Amino acid sequence: MPVTIDRTTSSRAAPPARLSLTPGPGGLDGMWWPRSRALTRELPLLTEALGGVWGRITGITVNPAYWTVIPRRVSVTGRTVQVGWSTEEQDPHRVTLFTADGRRDVLVIPPESGAEAAAQLMAGADIDAPALEGAAERIDARSREEAWETDGGARPPSSLSRPMGSTGRLPARRRR
């Protein structure tokens, strides 16, 4: 007798987004510590959590520097939120969320951060914005170096220009 397993639904509830909504220096409206670099999994949790506080999230912009795949849209509680990206106008350590009231900038604490380092960054009321972003950059640099050492090398970041509002996967790199 064949057995069918439905993996499309899960009885486990998704874990809540790890957020600090204390306004920070440099126009930061909060800090977010995602569990992974999978935006399709992380952005719905973030937008759902922030929608209850800031109102309906209508759009999101990221910088592709640290995200391998950028979805064009994500589903959040029965509706769709558009996702865009930019390398020129978007800080690589921030996610910008758009609501009817304007924009909100959230510092992204790298998911590879240890719990102690992330807690210090999220409680960083006494730390200025460049120091916060510098700490995030050091964690990302350490993560890239570890990936290089453990995964047999890494592809260098793309230097292709990406216009604001572009979505989807990053274009393939041309060989010279």
Image (cartoon, rainbow, N blue to C red):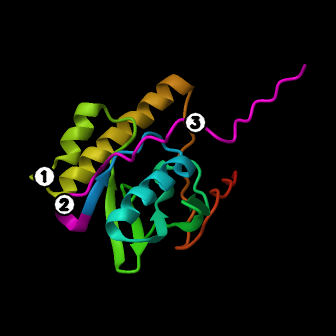
The label on residue 11 is 3
Could you say whether the residue bearing mark 2 is in a helix, strand or loop?
Answer: loop
Q: Residues within 10 Å of mark 1 (few under 14, many from 20)?
A: some
Q: Residues within 10 Å of mark 2 (few under 14, many from 20)?
A: many
The label on residue 111 is none
Residue lying at the far bottom in this picture: please name it. Answer: 101
Marks 1, 3: nearer the viewer: 3
Q: Is residue 112 left or right of residue 167?
A: left
Which residue has dot 1 on it?
A: 127
Residue at the image point whose x is 33% and y is 69% from the top: 54
Q: Nearer the viewer, residue 176 or 91?
A: 91
Q: CA distance from mark 2 to mark 1?
A: 8 Å
Q: Amino acid at mark 3?
A: Ser
Res. 13 visible in picture: yes
Residue 14 magenta-highlighted: yes
> Where is residue 2, by image quadrant?
top right
The magenta span reads 1-28
> Where is residue 96, by image quadrant?
bottom left
The label on residue 24 is 2
Up the image or down, 30 lies above or below 102; here it is: above
Compare marks 1 and 3 and give the one earlier in the sequence: 3
Q: Nearer the viewer, residue 91 or 39?
A: 39
> Where is residue 135, by image quadrant?
top left
Compare marks 2 and 1 and give the one earlier in the sequence: 2
